Image (cartoon, rainbow, N blue to C red):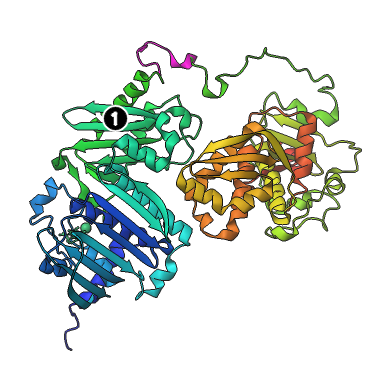
Amino acid sequence: MSDIIQLLPDHVANQIAAGEVVQRPASVVKELLENAIDANATNIQLIVKDAGKTLIQVIDNGKGMSVTDARLSFERHATSKISSAEDLFQLNTKGFRGEALASIAAIAHVEMKTKRDDDDLGTLIKIEGSKVTEQEVVVTPTGTSIAVKNLFFNIPARRNFLKSDQVEMRHVIDEFQRVALVHADVSFSLYHNGTDVFNLPISNYRQRIVNIFGGKTNEKLVPVTEDTEIVAISGFVMKPEFAKKSSKEQFFFVNDRYIKSSYLNHAVSSAFDGLLKEKANPGYFLYLQVDPKTIDINIHPTKTEIKFDNEHDLYAIIKSTVKHSLGQFQIAPILDFQRDSSMDTPYSYQGKNIANPTIEVDRSFNPFEADQKGKSMSGGGIPKMSFKKNNDSWEGLYVGLESKMTHDSIDVSTIEVESEEVTGAFFESDEVVQEHVTLQVQNKYIISKIKSGMMVIHQHRAHERILFEEFLQHITVHQAVSQQLLFPVIIDVTKEELTFLNDIKSVLEHTGFVLSKLENEAIEISGIPAAIRNEQVAFIISDLLACVDESAIEDDSLHATLVAKSMAKSIAIKSGKPLTKQEQEDIVNRLFACKEPTITPTNKSIFITYNTNDFDKKLL
Ligand code: ADP
Ligand code: MG
């Protein structure tokens, strides 16, 4: 038999390697911007068309390349940045693998123009799928311009895998920001489809952050500085009251390189302990300088994670530095070390009026009355018994129900909110039950009597389901009732959040929101859905903005579900809220008028049932 192993031709090897480096347009943006920085450019322009699917062009005024270098730059493992493995430990450039241009050229049409300052004429090179198609001498300014067109033109499967323009553009902007935030001494601009998205003049860190995240950011920043043997830290944290649910404004840079580190992120969060609302993430822009020998950036192909030699020390230094800054700027009392933090007012109570405790007496309570069986349990809670969940066939629990309920997945166009006449029937039994007997346990569950025994309903989840279906119906049939606000609510947003809000604007309006202005750094809301209160607006929007990242939003048709889900979750009554009898009954009734009363929009069970037969067996 003949030998079967052969060396892959270069263009095939390059195409395979490209898969590692180039996942999407944003990967190309990252590589080209980093090359421009490594070439000491002081002005960098990024031009994209169709979120980079059609064109990504980076023009820099850096040092440019000679004819030979220009040609060589597209070879694999061709780099001017390291010459031996030892160099890896004293890197001060972003690139070092010499793979990026080769990979990009393997899967796109690339056109490069480059000229060094000392040369009179520059070089033009065109490459398609690793093959040089043109090379000439050209007149071009000092620096390099690389245009990458028709990404993945020769790998249709990869091209089809790309997400919507909105999503891809969001990734492009992320990469752009990560580079721009740490190179304030370089001016950057970004144009997308002919419009100017960012225009960032040379400035300092603070000004750069403000130019990217909006004018209101300035007052939110608390400076952080520390200089130790291990690390020099500078940058800013955001005042705790501006913490957002999304983690979009969290940036670590190590030696001018953006990195992700959940460990160090934890160090910052823990410095904010007790200062943040539930689930809020502190914003920060922290620039660390460490000895390059103490890090290994080589562990991740796209290089956003790095390994530190002295991670634990870094953790402690970051935590105490951030804490100190917050204290210095009188955001947290730090000097009083003896303070017992358990005496602090919990965040959710701060600024609220103190109400005298009241005692509620249920005058109708009679432990000997048969109908009150459920109630008499409230003291000891529900005994722990392993009854079978019966959610799948919950309809069977009620009499006379068969025709009304279906389990079909929700078809939004046919949502009808069926009400009392149906639910009345669910709970009617041969015994004379005028009203549904309900009971609230631990301000969290509603117990309801049913024909076969009882049902324990999770109040928050039930309400979430009810609101979800209501909102979805409003959005679908455009019948929401809106209440005009006397004083419009203004909410600060970043550019990216604004894009997202623009995407979902029509859906939001169908729920009853009136978005009177969507401007550069703020939105103005002058009307809100009838179902929500004025003071809920800000956190409903902030919950929604936390979905910016969610993959669901890449499909336009999912916007309605996304908005309905998020709003329902935000305003559904919480566990822990005492409910009146009327409210409990209302929830039970409305829940069972829902299309899908058994599970929440995020697929959590809403109730469980207990059968009296089970009681009988257990209590033999
Ligand atoms: P790496 O950045 O890892 O060295 P690349 O494939 O990104 O690998 O680039 C290869 C080489 O091409 C670089 O080492 C550099 O010498 C040269 N180069 C790339 N982009 C530019 C640029 N914008 N200006 C000047 N030189 C560049
Ligand atoms: Mg590079």
Q: Is mark 1 within 8 Å of ligand 2?
A: no
Residue 309: say if magenta: no
Residue 350 at what x, y percent from top left?
Answer: 55, 20
Left or right of 618, for residue 203: left
Q: Is residue 197 above or below residue 3?
A: above
**At numbered mark 1, what does the secondary structure look like: helix, strand or loop?**
helix
Q: Toward the viewer: 194 or 443? A: 194
Residue 508 at what x, y percent from top left?
Answer: 63, 48
Residue 612 position by quadrant = top right
Q: Amino acid at mark 1?
A: Ile
Residue 317 position by quadrant = top left
Q: Toward the viewer: 393 or 604? A: 604
Q: Residue at x 54, y 37 (%)?
A: 491
Residue range corresponding to the magenta coloring: 332-343
Q: Is residue 338 above or below residue 273?
A: above
Total labels: the figure holds 1
Can residue 598 be seen here? The reply is no
Left or right of 410, for residue 69: left
Quadrant housing the N terminus:
bottom left
Q: Quadrant of ligand 1?
A: bottom left
